[in-house]
Image: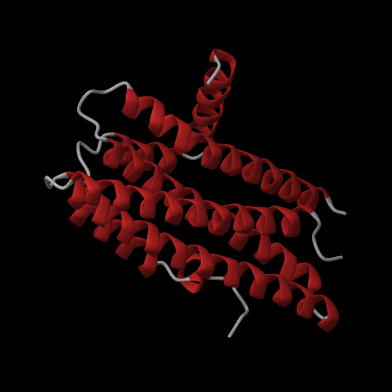
């Protein structure tokens, strides 16, 4: 990855964090994880599977 | 178009651009940070990319929800347009559920890979990594399809 691309990515992330502070908290949790075990993978899978379309899109008009 | 609607449209577009950029940035960022830290195993770097893309997709659906509020409000009283928006919703929902299913396979493969690398059988570790890479490729395709659909629909709202 070129230094220019790295700078661009850092700028984009900084802008996203400035606009939406919750992004900073989520990134902090993700990037400070010390090690990944099979249990971590299963917990991540559960988090994905629990988030239904309807829970993420509460204004959906689908039945 | 009223000033309020124009402002909302600009904000939604800006939000989408930011979230797409963030989603694209998370994976290389995790790899960069992971590769620069001796305590991070390849499994941990992959795990960070996985959870990062999960946050990005869930944030994108939050954006999609905001878009739908405006879209349904504009289409109120026009059954044809409401039906068109519902059709878009069906497509996004289907793509999200495909992404969920593919990410479940990535996590399963990641768990096997992580367990295999802590064992002593290097053949098992190699085959687990291969299965993991295949699952990641499928997951990445689902991810791109979902992001593209949300971007396409929201940038050309039903009129």
| Residue appearing at x 54%, y 57% in the figure | B62
Quadrant for the C terminus of chain A, please. Answer: bottom right
Q: From this viewpoint, is residue B96 visible?
A: yes
| Spot occupied by residue B126 in the image (x, y as percentages of width and height) | 29, 46
The relative height of residue B70 versus residue A1 in the rendered view (above or below) is below
How many numbered marks, from 0 up? Answer: 0
- Which residue is more in the foreground, B19 or A4? A4
Visual colour scheme: secondary structure
| Residue appearing at x 41%, y 66% in the figure | A51
The relative height of residue B77 versus residue B146 in the rendered view (above or below) is below
- Which residue is more in the foreground, B97 or B128? B128
| Residue appearing at x 54%, y 65% in the figure | B96
In the shown orientation, is residue A46 left or right of residue B95?
left
| Spot occupied by residue B39 in the image (x, y as percentages of width and height) | 20, 28
| Residue with the most extreme left position | B120
In the shown orientation, is residue A15 left or right of residue B2?
left
| Residue appearing at x 68%, y 59% in the figure | B149
| Residue with the most extreme front position | B123
| Residue with the most extreme top position | A3
**The quarter of the displayed image where residue B84 is located:** bottom right
In the shown orientation, is residue B56 left or right of residue B157?
left
| Spot occupied by residue B125 in the image (x, y as percentages of width and height) | 24, 47
| Spot occupied by residue B38 in the image (x, y as percentages of width and height) | 22, 23
Q: From this viewpoint, is residue A57 visible?
A: no
- Which residue is more in the foreground, B37 or A52? B37
**The quarter of the displayed image where residue B18 is located:** top right
């Amino acid at each position: 990855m070129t230094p220019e691309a790295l700078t661009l990515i850092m700028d984009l992330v900084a802008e996203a964090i400035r606009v939406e502070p919750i992004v900073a908290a989520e990134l902090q949790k993700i990037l400070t994880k010390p090690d990944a075990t099979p249990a971590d993978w299963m917990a991540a899978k559960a988090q994905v599977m629990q988030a239904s379309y309807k829970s993420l899109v509460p204004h959906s008009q689908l039945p | 178009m009223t000033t309020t609607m124009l402002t909302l449209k600009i904000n939604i577009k800006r939000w989408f651009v930011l979230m797409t950029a963030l989603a694209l940035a998370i994976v290389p960022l995790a790899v960069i940070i992971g590769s620069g830290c001796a305590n991070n195993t390849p499994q941990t770097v992959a795990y960070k990319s996985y959870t990062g893309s999960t946050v990005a997709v869930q944030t994108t659906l939050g954006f999609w929800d905001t878009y739908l509020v405006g879209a349904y409000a504009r289409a109120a009283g026009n059954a044809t347009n409401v039906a068109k928006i519902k059709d878009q919703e069906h497509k996004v929902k289907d793509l999200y559920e495909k992404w969920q299913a593919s990410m479940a396979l990535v996590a399963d493969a990641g768990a096997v890979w992580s367990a295999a690398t802590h064992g002593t059988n290097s053949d098992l570790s190699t085959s687990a990594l291969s299965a993991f890479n295949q699952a990641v490729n499928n997951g990445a395709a689902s991810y791109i399809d979902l992001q593209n659909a949300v971007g396409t629909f929201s940038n050309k709202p039903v009129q």
